[in-house]
Image (spheres, rainbow, N blue to C red):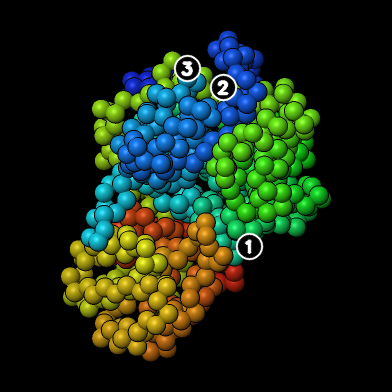
Amino acid sequence: MMQNPKGLLALALVFVSASCKTASSNPAEIGQLGTAASSRWTDSVLASLTLREKAAQIVWPFVLGDYVSGDSPQWRRLTQYVQQEKVGGFIISVGSPTEVAAKLNALQSMSRVPLLFGADLEAGAGFRARGGYFVPNAIDLGGAIVFPPEMAIGATRDTTLAYEQGRLTAVEGRALGIHIAYAPVLDVNNNPDNPVINTRSYGEDPELVARMGVAFIHGLQDHGMIATGKHFPGHGDTGVNSHLALPVVTVSRSRLDALELVPFRAAIKGGVGAIMSFHGVMPALDSSNVPGTLSSKVLTDLLRGEMGFKGMIISDAMDMRGVLDQFGAAEAAKRAIAAGVDVLIQPLDVPQTIDAVAAGVREGRYTEARLDSSVRRVMEAKRALGLARNKLVDLSRLRFLVGDSSNTQIARRVAEKSITLVKDSLRQIPLSVPGARVLSITLARRTDLPAGNAFNAELRSGLPNLRTEFVATEDAALNYPRLIAAADSADVTIVSSYIGHRSDALTVSAPQAFTNFVQSLVQRGRKPIVVAFGNPYLLQQLPWVGTYLVAWGGFPVSQAAAARALLGTSAISGHLPISIPPYASRGAGEDRAVQLR
């Protein structure tokens, strides 16, 4: 793994400046935000701000990367946020690369003080900057590079690939005008029932999560983007979705030290620029039953004091129930700042949140000097990223930096190396039945337009007699007898599940009717091959299947890699970074060589 050599830092400065056509950023400073005295520029800007304008600098609204007209309510609202409310940044969500970059340039042009843009780039810049799918034809409109989820990287055990993902995320993200990646996820996913982290984590081994996370951080920050380790102090051992309710992690402090805190300590030592808080309760750290985002014992005493973190502390989204239900939006904002949060992202009401932060000073909840310390960190980040000199990106160079074919090959390498054959008791993999009649059944939500497309297309290249079927999870009246009849007439049946974690999900379990269907295939001797593109723990619901392959994610790059693995045109070498109790232990995985044809 590359460990921040001085020569690489210098090269990164040249590359970001010359290729992205933005002002050069300083990777060394990115990893040391808040450690040095403020610059003259920061002091000058800070001195020019009113109390409310200071509060606005640390309140960052949500903005979609979609196209909207200049007279639309959406654009008028964004204009208000920048020109009247004077916010300090935004969290940017999905859109095409060109529209994201053009929209961020337009917002920057309206702001006197440069804006910071952050995004959930957990699986690369394409995790947010893709063109989507045109309906009803499901035409892929392209975009930035999408990597497999973090757990796929964990399955490779390859820190070089983790570094490369960080590097490409930074290069493409900065070309789009994004400055902060809300990644990597440093949660240790040791709870199979976790409905919200799951494959977003590198795995259940804290040392593996630490190694992979630090490699990603270095790749990202060496190339001009701030990394954000999340969700401190750890969201891995939860069975509750913090978007919907308040999780409680009732483990001892010694367990936290031995597991949850290990990756965060490594990230801080590795120079991570930002850390995001967890909207969950850990009684071992704070017995007052407040989420970590609102706890000074968690953020000030532990993170700042004991662990020595000097960078930005960013809240998780402030519109999530895990932080709203106890106190409401305004009080939660005040408590977060008092606890030590530097930036509040995605609040329910932007003007109300700015007013609440300013009111906290007037009410004596915290001092103006406390608020100034957060604003200063934000300003120093803007300066370190070069935004004080040039805050716009060059749209004419975008298509030569984003989605480049060489970048695509790196994502393909990650996907191929991650494919994990957990069990194959009947030695069905690779498929070696020339001219066979193959049935490929896809289980996914009806709105999951890409589910099965790339997988089936790649399979068809080697299996011309392929028949495909789609099963919508919402369809309670599905005609399973018809699918059983189709399987009876096939030589090989492949069943692929795209059910996984979602922000609105209470569970990652497959519908009972579907598991009953797969069991009936086994009982009829059809020997189904099950491929998990969503929840890797699906084996717990289907323990009687003979062949179980984990592809970790449903992005096209992983779908194609899984198909090549089944066909034998690429090797299988992934090993579980998790256990699937009681059926598979961590490290399990059968290797397969490329099959010569």
Residue type at numbered disc 2 = Met
Residue type at numbered disc 1 = Gly
Above-or-below relation of 367 to 440: above
Above-or-below relation of 493 to 575: below
Q: Which residue is mark 2?
A: 379
Q: Nearer the viewer, mark 1 or mark 3?
A: 3
Q: Position of residue 438 (x, y in %)?
A: 26, 76
Q: Which residue is mark 3?
A: 388
Q: Position of residue 393 (x, y in %)?
A: 35, 26
Q: Residues within 10 Å of mark 3 (few under 14, many from 20)?
A: some
Whichever of callouts 2 and 1 sits on the residue coming sooner in the sequence is: 1
**Which residue is nearer to you in this view: 23 or 220?**
23
Describe residue 573's horizontal placement relative to residue 89 as left or right: left
Q: Which residue is mark 1?
A: 239
CA–CA distance between discs 2 and 1?
37 Å
State if disc 2 and disc 3 touch (CB < 8 Å): no
Above-or-below relation of 331 to 248: above
